[in-house]
Each structure stands twice: as C-alpha cells, then as structure tokens.
Image: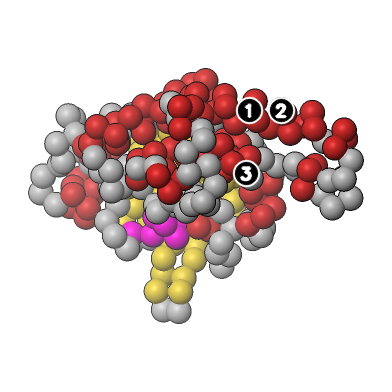
C-alpha cells in the first residue's frame, strides 16, 4: 500500500487553546482510517485543517507528495479531498438525482457562454446523469432518484452526502460522524457502503466517529487523539487495548466492540 496523505508536526491553536499539538499521521490509500478521542481532543480541527478551513501555524500536509499546507478549501477540493459534515445539508427542494448533478465538476451547461449551444454540452450532461445513476445504485438509492431530498431519512441523507462527494471525483473523503444520529441497523449499512466504495472505487476515507461499537468492525486503521496529540495508532484491537487510550479516553473499560 502507499501513503496518500501525510501529516507532519501539525500545530493549530485558537488564542491560548492548543487544538493540534504536533500531529503526525500517515493515511494509506484505499484504507478506511478512523480517528477516535473524547470531545475536545482536536479531531474535527484536524479534519478542518486538512480540508483548508483552518490554516496551521506549523507543520505540513502532503497529498500524494504535494505540499498542500495552507491551500484554500476550493483548491484542496479540486485536488480530490472532500469533506462531509455531521449534519447533511442537501438542497432540500431538489431531487436526489439533482443533488448529485449539481456536484458534478465542470458541467459545461452552467457556463453563460456555452449554455446557449446545447450540442456542445449535451453529451457531457448525459455522462453526468449516467455517473449519478451508477453512484445511486452503489448506495442503493436508485429507487429514490426523483424524490425531493427533504423526504429522505437522516441515514439516507448521509448516503446522499457520500454520493455528492463521489460525484465530484473525490479521492479522499473526510467524514465527521457518518453514523451519528441514525439507528444501529442503518449505521451498519452506512459503513458497509463505505467498505464497498473503498473496494470498488478505490476511495480513501478518514473518519471521525464516536460509535466505536459499530465503526471499529469496518475500519482498517485507527488513530487515537487526546488534547491535540496522537497518543496511539494501529489496528482497532491494539489501540483499544493501549493503556494510554484506556486511561485518557475510554476510562477503565473498553466499549463493547467485540475486541
């Protein structure tokens, strides 16, 4: 396997609060890597910094060997690093299909100069529709293609967020609590979809998740954070049994994750 994202000595503070304190990570390509830790550990700050929403004071972020430290969010997005959020925000009045189509990169029909000349972009738009239906099939949302996004369940909206990321040719998807707020059955289904997308599409995932009993069954590698630092890394069973993790995050007992 090869490293697609490398984080070196990353530091970020907000006033007197140190949110990231020399974070080092190596994210393997086509892995589902999970970041765990208590509230305030710095997990979301790390994801936001990778996505360009925050600029670090020190350290480097390298994507496929390219230094993207401090790049603006749109430039990082165009490189294929896409961040999704804990609370999905689809266009409520648009259909499921339309939500995917608006995420399609470089749609020539959106250009004021090209829009009047239908023959110049109609084939590209047909390609976009085909791509959208293929993604809906992967996510098992194809029967809902013409339904307004406002009619979807919370779990279906989270799947739609993943679909929008795939629609814009994401290579790394940064996810904040994909299983948050959904029932256990659907949470398992979401992670099963992530595994299928990893295997079939070669997508790399970096996930923040608190529902360890569900998520740890599906991930390839785990990092644990506490007070802005990485305190442990490795396979799920090894991280959960690490004394530093037990003492600083899990308390005196590990969650019922089957390890």
User: Does the CB distance between marks 2 and 1 fall below 8 Å?
Assistant: yes
Q: Please tell me which residue is depicted at 24% across the width and 48% down the height of the picture.
A: 245
Can residue 59 be seen? no
User: Does the CB distance between marks 3 and 1 fall below 8 Å?
Assistant: no
Q: Residues within 10 Å of mark 1 (few under 14, many from 20)?
A: some
Residue labelled with disc 1: 131
Q: Earlier in the sequence, mark 3 or mark 1?
A: 3
Which quadrant of the view contains residue 213? top left
Magenta residues span 41-47
Residue labelled with disc 3: 103
SS label for mark 3: loop
- Residue 201's place in the image compared with 241, above or below, is above
Q: Residues within 10 Å of mark 2 (few under 14, many from 20)?
A: few
- Residue 142's place in the image compared with 76, above or below, is above
**CA–CA distance in space, label 2 to label 3:** 13 Å
Please tell me which residue lies in front, 79 or 13: 79
29 magenta-colored: no
Q: How many marks?
A: 3
Residue labelled with disc 2: 127
The reply, left or right, for residue 152 in relation to residue 146 is: left
42 magenta-colored: yes
């Amino acid at each position: 396997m090869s490293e697609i994202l490398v984080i070196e000595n990353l530091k970020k503070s907000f006033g007197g609060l140190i949110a990231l304190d020399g974070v080092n990570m190596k994210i393997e390509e086509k892995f589902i890597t999970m970041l765990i830790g208590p509230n305030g550990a710095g997990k979301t700050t790390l994801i936001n910094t990778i996505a360009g929403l925050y600029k670090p004071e020190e350290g480097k972020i390298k994507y496929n060997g390219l230094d993207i430290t401090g790049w603006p969010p749109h430039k990082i997005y165009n490189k294929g690093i896409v961040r999704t959020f804990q609370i999905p925000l689809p266009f409520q009045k648009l259909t499921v299909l339309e939500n995917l189509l608006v995420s399609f990169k470089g749609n020539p029909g959106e250009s004021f100069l090209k829009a009047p000349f239908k023959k110049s972009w109609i084939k590209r738009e047909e390609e976009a529709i085909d791509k959208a239906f293929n993604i809906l099939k992967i996510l098992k949302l194809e029967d809902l293609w013409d339904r307004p996004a406002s009619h979807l369940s919370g779990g279906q909206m989270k799947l739609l967020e993943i679909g929008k990321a795939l629609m814009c040719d994401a290579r790394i998807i940064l996810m904040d609590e994909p299983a948050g707020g959904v029932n256990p059955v659907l949470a398992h289904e979401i992670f099963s979809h992530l595994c299928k997308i990893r295997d079939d599409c070669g997508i790399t995932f970096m996930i923040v998740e608190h529902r360890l009993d569900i998520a740890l069954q599906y991930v390839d590698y785990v990092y644990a954070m506490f007070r802005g630092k990485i305190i442990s890394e490795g396979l799920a069973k090894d991280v959960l049994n690490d004394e530093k993790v037990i003492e600083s995050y899990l308390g005196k007992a590990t969650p019922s994750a089957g390890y």
